[in-house]
Image (cartoon, helix red, strand yellow):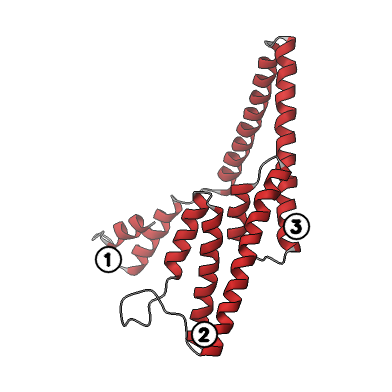
Amino acid sequence: MNDVIESVLNDETLQTNEERAEAIKKGLATLVIPKDKYNDLSAKLKTTESNYSTLSNEYEEFKKSKMTEDEKKQAEIDELNSKKIEVAKSESKYAVKDLFEEKGIKLEKEKMDKILDDIVTDNKNQTLAIANTIASVLLETAEQTKKQTTVDLLNGTPKPVVGSPGDSNVNNLDVYEKKLEEAIKNKDVVSQATYTRLIQEEKSKLSKVKM
């Protein structure tokens, strides 16, 4: 579109604004797909997609036709096992969510999803064992944070901020969040809990500063 307009504006043969406007109109018309042509292309795309689906199904049927009876049975078993694993993982996922909810642990959706991706397996008992460990650490660190915050308020002394000497505006939130991402990536549940606590402390501290 910009090329069309620029070409018209640089065309010295066009003397009036009306001529330029008409030239721009004609140029832009070439960039617009007519409705009937669009509908035709859309119909062809749907036909292509349908044909691809049909060919894909026919290919799968062809592969099955070349299988021995034992291979067919094994393929059915593999498909069934795959579905069982997905169902089991789904059960584990909801079991962890229920566990965290029962213990009063609330996390941001993104962080919760990352934890689920790291610990959920098709073995629900194993998944819940890991989830219980994470929950215990989170609750313990949350309680420690609460106690320390109370002590700080009673003493009237804010927590020191790690940063350049004399720089009272430095905060570690970005650093802790990056460390948490690394811990999640490395599946280090202890570090995940630690940096989750530190992030909560930092946010609490920053909110006090703003007040």
Other-residue count near label 2 (Cα within 10 Å), few / some / many at <14 / 14–19 / ≥20: few
SS class of the residue under badge 3? helix
**Of discs 1 and 2, which sits in the foreground?**
2
Q: Amino acid at mark 1?
A: Gln
**Residue with the mark numbered 2:** 208
At horizontal 38% and vertical 77% (from top left) the residue drawn is 170
Q: Is 17 placed above or below 120 here?
A: below
Q: Which callout, 1 or 3, points at the residue further toward the start of the chain?
A: 1
Q: Which callout, 1 or 2, points at the residue further toward the start of the chain?
A: 1
On the image, which quarter does residue 196 sit in?
bottom right
At horizontal 63% and vertical 72% (from top left) the residue drawn is 143
Q: Is 155 placed above or below 60 here?
A: below
Image coordinates of residue 208 in percent, x first then y, are 51, 85
Q: Are marks 1 and 2 in contact (CB under 8 Å)?
A: no
For marks 2 and 3, give the CA distance. Answer: 32 Å
Of 91 and 162, which appears nearest the observer? Answer: 162
Image coordinates of residue 31 in percent, x first then y, are 44, 51
**Residue with the mark numbered 1:** 15
**Residue with the mark numbered 3:** 98
